[in-house]
Amino acid sequence: MLEGQIPKSVSDLSHLRVLVLYENNYRGSLDKLFVNSTSGKGILESLQVLDLAYNKLSGSLPDLRAFSALTEVYFGGNNFTGSIPLSFGQLSGLHVLDLSNNSLEGIVSESHFIMLDKLEILDLSLNSLVLHFAPDWSPVFQLDYILLAGCNVGPSFPKWIRTQRNFSILDLSRANIADEVPAWLWSVSLSLGILYLPHNQITGSVPSLSSTLIQYIDLSNNSISGPIPLFYSNVQLIQLSGNTFSGSISSICQARHGLIGVLDLSNNQLAGEVPNCWENMPNLHSLNLASNSFWGEIPHSLGSLNHLVALHLRDNSLSGEFPSTLRRCQKLRLIDVALNELTGNKQIAWQYSC
């Protein structure tokens, strides 16, 4: 809960290597903080880690060229404005660059990364930046985390990502992409575990993902079509709502998904009976199949979901009575089965959910 401006006396710590002031209430600009008032040159030449994330700092980003030893920079969660200085591209030892969740704008080009061959984590999320790279750009770095949510990356799917072979996280949420999902995306990195592409205008289909390591996948609110793919057995989150997936979802019965907690297939064009194999997902706590064309009875195996908190089945063509097995779901807090063709005593249904 430290407040005020970061004290200029920090600049006197000439041998300081790590400065972490994360999550305080520091305000003001960084323009002159690390500069000798007499010579105008940087002082903290030994600084390797600079973490000022989640304060209330404002103004433009500082020129960090004098800090040649920097390996990690965390400026996320502040109120920085303006563009990213080209001088950031001169920090040849940089491994982590986090400028997320600010009010930065302007164009980001190849020049911002010209010497960043050691960069592993790039987080520019939640800014108003426009990423403009040549179609044949081949970056000097190999990233582990690619976090560009909210940046203007499109309209084409960024081809430079194909040059990255080791990334484990890719987040292009709300990135203004209006393109077909490229076939290479699913195999370009064998380490990919988290894939977020929601709120774009992405088309195409998704192949089987059973041989990948993707544990968290969010493709919601796009225009992706085709059948529901097979998933990695250790998948934990599947968000596919708001697309045009079609056909049955019987494929989810082909493997045991013992870790999955969230399955959201709502607002698609799925049809057929809801499969009766929910014992294969013992840790599921949120199931959303709303606004599709499912028919038949609500499967009794839903009662095996001891961790189920929310069940959304509204706006389908489900029939029959509410299954008594849902009484076993002691954690269930929300049931939405409106706009179906269910029969029986609704008071019994209320007893199951209360």
Image (tube, rainbow, N blue to C red):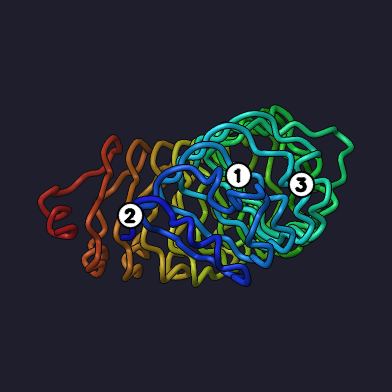
What secondary structure is found at the residue carrying circle 2? strand
Is residue 164 shown above or below 305? Answer: above
Distance in Å between CA atoms under marks 2 and 1: 20 Å
Residue type, label 2: Glu
Mark 2 near mark 3, Cβ–Cβ under 8 Å?
no
Judging by the rendered image, the residue that carries numbered circle 1 is 62
Q: Which residue is mark 2?
A: 3
In the figure, is residue 109 to the left or right of 221?
A: right
Residue 43 in percent (x, y) is at 64, 59
Q: Earlier in the sequence, mark 2 or mark 3?
A: 2
Q: Quadrant of the C terminus?
A: bottom left
Q: Nearer the viewer, mark 1 or mark 3?
A: 1
Furthest-left residue in this view: 347
Quarter of the image where the N terminus is located = bottom left
**What residue occupies the far front of the structure in this picture?**
38
Q: CA distance from mark 2 to mark 3?
A: 31 Å
Q: Is residue 17 above or below residue 92?
A: below
Q: Residue at x 75, y 38 (%)?
A: 158
The amino acid on which the numbered mark 3 sits, given as a three-letter code, is Gly
Query: Can residue 213 be seen here?
Result: yes
Please state the horizontal and vertical placement of residue 84, each as a whole percent of the image: 65, 38
Give the secondary structure at mark 3: helix
Label 3, on which residue? 89
